[in-house]
């Protein structure tokens, strides 16, 4: 039976297996891909289709790929699915988020050990009630890298914990405008009360796909600001600089390469 998936290249990301490394960094923004690839050796663009901008280079002699996912779970899931078909087995999402817990300030790094499944994509992979969780080896590598960055950069902060994944950005920042505000607002209060660190849009999907496919996934996020601090009139910082998160992801990949070789 003929299928749109019968082509030699992956249908969406347009890569061949020989163009993809075992290790992959997943930013959302296609424009961030060249910045991350610049930290690899001999990185070149191997594909660019829709939201998927793909570069591959090497790190410590091992092939590493950087692939953007666009915004949200559906396209992120496609990226993981098709990269895994090309042989990738280790994924690190690098992204941004809005802080929820009051201890989070703009500029802090957040390592997601698991994600609240408040989106739709994960329900195509995991049953209701099953958690979307990071792989421990990737989680540990990210936390160790964040700790080293914190020490080397005079105390820049990082946190490890639960994040919230959703489908609607404005359902987070302007929930009162939604037709289901009576549903969204109490849930948000629950997330605050339970110590959820931040809100973003891709972790739950990436973790869910990874768990089903048997590949390793983790995530490091940069908090842009903290909504709850702003609501309460507390001091906060605003940032659009994700360079520390990028460094953290690359160093985590380096650690995983060394561990896997050992």
Image (cartoon, rainbow, N blue to C red):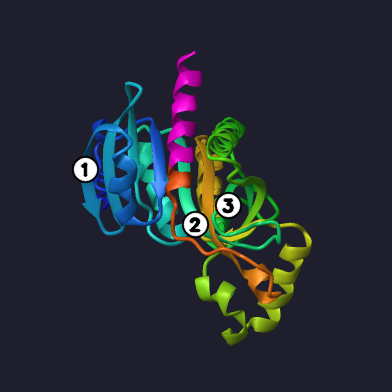
Secondary structure that dominates the magenta span: helix
- Percent across and percent down for residue 44 are 21, 38
> Closer to the camera: disc 1 or disc 2?
2
Q: Is residue 21 above or below residue 179?
A: above
**Mark 1 or mark 3, which is nearer the start of the sequence?**
1
Which residue is found at the position 47% from the left and 45% from the top?
A: 244
Which residue is found at the position 61% from the left and 46% from the top?
A: 157
Q: Quadrant of residue 246?
A: top left
- Write down the residue under mark 3: 108
- Badge 3: how crowded within 10 Å, few (<14), some, or many (20+)? many
**Mark 3 or mark 2, which is nearer the start of the sequence?**
2
Name the outermost residue toward the right.
193
- Percent across and percent down for residue 206 are 50, 48
Determine the CA span between mark 1 and mark 2: 23 Å
For residue 93, say whether it is visible.
no
Pointer 3 with pointer 1, Cβ within 8 A? no
- Write down the residue under mark 2: 96
Mark count:
3
Q: Which residues are magenta?
A: 247-262
Q: Is residue 109 above or below residue 51?
A: above
- Badge 1: how crowded within 10 Å, few (<14), some, or many (20+)? some
> Closer to the camera: disc 3 or disc 1?
3
Which residue is found at the position 51% from the left and 20% from the top?
A: 259
- Badge 2: how crowded within 10 Å, few (<14), some, or many (20+)? many
Q: Which mark is residue 45?
A: 1
> Closer to the camera: disc 2 or disc 3?
3
In the picture, measured across the screen, residue 168 lies left or right of residue 236, that is left
**Mark 2 or mark 1, which is nearer the start of the sequence?**
1
Q: Is residue 68 above or below residue 38?
A: below
Q: Secondary structure at mark 3?
A: loop
For residue 18, say whether it is visible.
yes
């Amino acid at each position: 039976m003929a299928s749109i998936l019968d082509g030699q290249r992956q249908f969406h990301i347009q890569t061949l297996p020989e163009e993809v490394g075992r290790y992959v960094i997943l930013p959302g923004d296609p424009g961030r891909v060249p910045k991350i690839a610049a930290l690899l050796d001999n990185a070149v663009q191997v594909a660019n289709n829709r939201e998927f901008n793909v570069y591959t280079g090497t790190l410590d002699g091992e092939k590493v790929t950087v692939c953007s996912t666009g915004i949200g779970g559906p396209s992120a899931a496609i990226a993981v699915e098709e990269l895994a078909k090309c042989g990738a087995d280790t994924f690190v999402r690098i992204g941004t988020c809005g802080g929820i817990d009051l201890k989070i300030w703009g500029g802090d790094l957040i390592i997601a050990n698991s994600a609240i499944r408040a989106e739709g994509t994960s329900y195509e992979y995991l049953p209701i009630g099953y958690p979307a969780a990071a792989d421990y080896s990737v989680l540990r590598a990210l936390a160790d890298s964040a700790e080293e960055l914190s020490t080397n950069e005079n105390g820049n902060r990082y946190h490890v914990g639960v994040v919230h994944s959703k489908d609607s950005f404005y359902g987070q920042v302007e929930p009162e405008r939604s037709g289901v505000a009576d549903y969204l607002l109490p849930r948000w209060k629950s997330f605050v009360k339970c110590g959820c660190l931040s809100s973003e849009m891709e972790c739950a999907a990436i973790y869910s796909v990874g768990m089903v496919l048997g590949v390793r996934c983790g995530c490091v996020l940069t908090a842009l600001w903290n909504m709850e601090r702003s609501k309460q009139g507390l001091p906060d910082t605003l940032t659009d600089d994700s360079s520390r998160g990028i460094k953290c992801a690359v160093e985590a990949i380096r650690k995983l390469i060394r561990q896997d070789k050992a």
